[in-house]
Image (cartoon, rainbow, N blue to C red):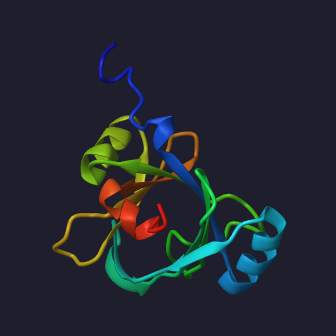
Amino acid sequence: MSDTDRAVLDHADLFHTGIVVDDLEAAKVELGEALGVTWHDGGAEIRMIGDDGARTVRSAYALSIEGPHHVELVQSIEGTVWTATGPGQAHHLGYWVDDVAATSAALVERGAVPIVAIAMADDRPALCAYLRTPNGLCVEIVDNALRKVLLPWE
């Protein structure tokens, strides 16, 4: 099997489905009750680096503690990748990867379009990136180094 025949992402590394919401606190209550999950809150000042330049935004999210497949609620931020697509609609699938830059390049080689890379500062490597596959699916690839940060209970 050639490298181009192999999948870039491994299904075993799929760890969350992301939903962008306009009201994070309300969504946590509603979906927590409906899905029977509890939440780990997170967020940070992050650097969004895209074709249109870089800017710093304050992110906020909640990740279900129950898994192994987690639900992620992300607070919408106007004019970013985190724009709500509609009530209750899945926004992206999140995968663990060992190398964000190399995985991004491999996905782009197969026709994916980069949306944005996320870093803590301009001079730091990307910790995660969002790309849109040729069929329109939005994927988030997340550096394995963040596993203990995002899933501290494991």
Residue lying furthest top in this view? 1
Residue 75 quadrant = bottom right
* 37 lies left or right of 60: right
Front residue (pair 104, 79): 104
The residue at 38%/64% (across/down) is 148
Looking at the rendering, which quadrant does residue 108 occupy?
Answer: top left
Number of numbered labels in the structure image: 0
Q: Residue furthest front?
A: 154
Q: What residue is at 46 percent from the left and 81 percent from the top?
A: 43
Residue 153 position in % (x across, y down): 49, 66
Q: In this view, does 83 lie above or below 44?
A: above
For the N terminus, the image quarter is: top left
Estimate the x, y position of residue 69 in percent, counting from the top left. Answer: 60, 51
| 109 or 93: nearer the viewer | 93
Query: On the picture, is 125 further left or further right than 109?
Result: left
Left or right position of 141 against 65: left
Q: Is residue 118 depicted above or below 103 in this figure?
A: below
Residue located farthest toward the right when viewing the structure as drawn: 34
Residue 128 at x, y percent in the picture: 36, 61
> Which residue: 42% across, 29% down?
7
- Place of residue 70 in the rendered image (x, y in percent of width and height, measured from the top left): 60, 57
In this view, 19 is above or below 55: above
Q: Residue sitting at 63 percent across and 74 percent down? A: 39
